[in-house]
Amino acid sequence: MTLVEFALLAPVALILLLGIVVSGIVAMNYVQLHNAVRDGARAAAVCGGSARDPNTTSGTLTPVTMLPNGQPCTDVNLIAYVKSRFQAIPGNVATLSVTLPTGGSGDHMSQCQYKKSVEIHASYDQPLFLPLISNLLSNNSSGSTYTITATAEATCEI
């Protein structure tokens, strides 16, 4: 009798367990995508601004010309910086876009003026791995992925 009960409940328990694992992966990538976009917006807002030089006691302002990873402040380097923040997302396949503060085109860093904002948008189609789980969690037409989106906005500094 116990074996029969186990045979009836084991598939349900396994599906629940796999659903919890897949949901955990989705949640982890959701948090990581939001953190990466937020870090990128902050880095973009600081680039082109000024910062206090920690090596001097006078507190003089010096221009910020480098991203936190040591690369020069350009759109290409900013997108590479944000993509490098996606450690768990396989192959850095997230789609990124940078909205310029002036709404123009070209390099954002030359257009980030004081009190204007920069926006970074990212989306990632998270595979759901299991057909039954994807039927329950999918939010797009493909049916086998869950689209995670993130947006961050930061105000350009002096």
Image: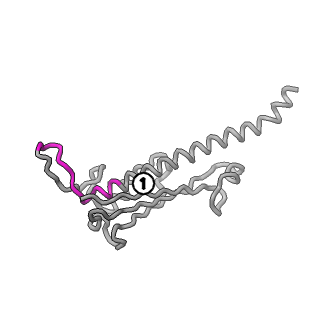
Q: Residue at x 39, y 54 (%)?
A: 82
- Which residue ends up furthest to the bottom in the rendered image? 104
On the image, the x and y values in percent for residue 46 come to: 28, 55
Which residue bears the numbered disc 1? 37
Q: For residue 13, what is the image quadrant?
A: top right
On the image, the x and y values in percent for residue 3 come to: 84, 28
On the image, the x and y values in percent for residue 123 come to: 50, 58
Q: Secondary structure at mark 1?
A: helix
| Label 1: few (<14), some (14–19) or many (≥20) C-alpha neighbours in 10 Å | many
Q: Is residue 40 left or right of residue 72?
A: right
* Residue placed most toward the observer, 29 or 61: 61
- Which residue ends up furthest to the right in the rendered image? 1
Quarter occupied by the N terminus: top right
Three-letter code, disc 1: Val
| Residues rendered magenta in the picture | 42-57
Q: Residue at x 66, y 52 (%)?
A: 137
Q: Residue at x 30, y 49 (%)?
A: 69
Q: Residue 24 colored magenta?
A: no
Q: Residue at x 32, y 71 (%)?
A: 106
Quarter occupied by the C terminus: bottom left
- Which residue ends up furthest to the top in the rendered image? 2
On the image, the x and y values in percent for residue 17 come to: 68, 38
